[in-house]
Image (tube, rainbow, N blue to C red):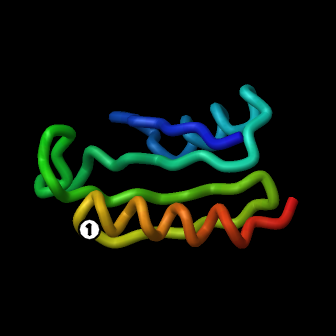
Amino acid sequence: MIGFALETNNEEENALSKLERKNLDMIVLNSTQDEDATFGGDLNKVTIFDKNGNKTELPLQSKLNIGIELINIISTFND
């Protein structure tokens, strides 16, 4: 199970707390800290955390590319 988090403060800490609280396999943190990664725009910057302690940061890129990267990461996930 994968969750998504849009955090404005203590981003990483809050996302990791949600990962544990909701017993998720992964959580995707949408950053609000990059002015080019807007909620309604075409660009995004995310960090993916999994329950095994792995952290994957995806740089600012199109939401389409983020989606493709997420599919690749999910398809190779081992719990």
Spot the residue most to the top: 21
Residue pictured at 30% horizontal, 62% vertical: 64
Q: Is residue 53 left or right of residue 36?
A: right
Q: Quadrant of the C terminus?
A: bottom right
- State which quadrant residue 56 falls in: bottom right
Q: Is residue 22 left or right of residue 72?
A: right
Residue pictured at 68% horizontal, 38% vertical: 19
Which residue is under mark 1?
60
Residue 43: where, in percent of width, then height?
Answer: 19, 58
Residue 31 vertical position relative to residue 9 in the rendered view, above or below: below
Q: Is residue 47 left or right of residue 8?
A: right
Residue pictured at 32% horizontal, 60% vertical: 45
- State which quadrant residue 18 falls in: top right
Residue 69: where, in percent of width, then height?
Answer: 47, 69
Residue 59 vertical position relative to residue 8 in the rendered view, above or below: below
Residue pictured at 38% horizontal, 47% vertical: 30
- State which quadrant residue 76 falls in: bottom right
How many labels were placed on the picture?
1
Residue 73: where, in percent of width, then height?
Answer: 61, 68
Spot the residue most to the right: 79
Q: Quadrant of the N terminus?
A: top right
Q: Is residue 2 left or right of residue 30?
A: right
| Dot 1: element | strand
Label 1 environment density (alpha carbons within 10 Å; few <14, some 14–19, many ≥20): some
Query: Quick one: 19 or 9, which is closer to the camera?
Result: 19
Query: Quick one: 13 or 55, which is closer to the camera?
Result: 55
Q: Amino acid at mark 1?
A: Leu
Residue 26 vertical position relative to residue 46 in the rendered view, above or below: above
